[in-house]
């Protein structure tokens, strides 16, 4: 769901660039941060809604919902970075879709690594914030998670996401200007 939310954000930004809405925002009293927060509200609500739907469909409604939503909210930062970089790099919707597919494959490597790699090789995917989110959700769903682990792995997820944002910040700012 995080990748889909990132796609929604990125495609909305690209659509606004194509239609010239981003130029209108520049002369309006709305700040850039307000604009991006507005672009992120709908994908966040979709993510929160689909979390409940997924828990119902997977018959996991008995798990700790507060822990689940803590991880989902922290992990939404991944969607923000995904969407912002997609919106910054792509010049049109076709480029955005192509770039998003390529970026999705890289992001999903961490889930594959977390699932398929033996424990002694798990360190190979520690670079990905999605790995940490996946790891703690696995513990929540198997009911082996505790709040200390949830907070720790959520902090790692947020920290790595923040690092990637800082590393990509110049590219994002330049592409969205």
Image (tube, grey):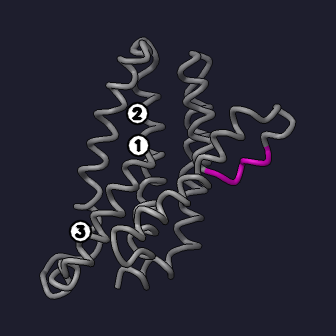
Q: Residues within 10 Å of mark 1 (few under 14, many from 20)?
A: some
The image shows residue 29 at horizontal and vertical percentages of 13, 80
Question: Which residue corresponds to the image point at 22% horizontal and 79% vertical from the top-left?
Answer: 22
The numbered disc on residue 133 is: none
| Mark 2, residue position | 69
The numbered disc on residue 73 is: 1
Q: Pointers 2 and 1 in contact (CB under 8 A)?
A: yes
Q: Pointers 3 and 1 in contact (CB under 8 A)?
A: no
Residue 125 belongs to the span the image colors magenta:
yes
Q: Secondary structure at mark 1?
A: helix
Q: Earlier in the sequence, mark 3 or mark 1?
A: 3
The answer to whether residue 132 is left or right of residue 56 is: right
Q: Residues within 10 Å of mark 3 (few under 14, many from 20)?
A: few
Q: Pointers 3 and 2 in contact (CB under 8 A)?
A: no
Q: Is residue 120 above or below residue 94?
A: above
The numbered disc on residue 34 is: 3
């Amino acid at each position: 769901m995080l990748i889909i939310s990132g796609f929604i954000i990125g495609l909305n930004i690209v659509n606004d660039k194509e239609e010239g809405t981003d130029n209108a925002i520049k002369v309006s009293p709305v700040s850039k941060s307000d604009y991006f927060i507005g672009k992120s509200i709908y994908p966040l609500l979709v993510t929160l809604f689909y979390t409940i739907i997924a828990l119902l469909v997977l018959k996991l409604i008995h798990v700790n919902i507060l822990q689940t939503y803590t991880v989902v909210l922290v992990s939404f930062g991944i969607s923000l970075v995904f969407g912002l970089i997609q919106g910054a790099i792509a010049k049109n919707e076709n480029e955005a879709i192509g770039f998003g597919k390529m970026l999705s494959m890289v992001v999903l490597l961490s889930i594959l690594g977390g699932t398929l790699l033996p424990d002694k090789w798990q360190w190979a995917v520690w670079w990905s914030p999605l790995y940490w989110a996946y790891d703690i959700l696995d513990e929540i769903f198997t009911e082996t998670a505790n709040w200390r682990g949830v907070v720790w792995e959520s902090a790692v997820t947020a920290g790595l996401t923040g690092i990637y944002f800082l590393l990509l910040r110049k590219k994002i700012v330049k592409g969205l200007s």
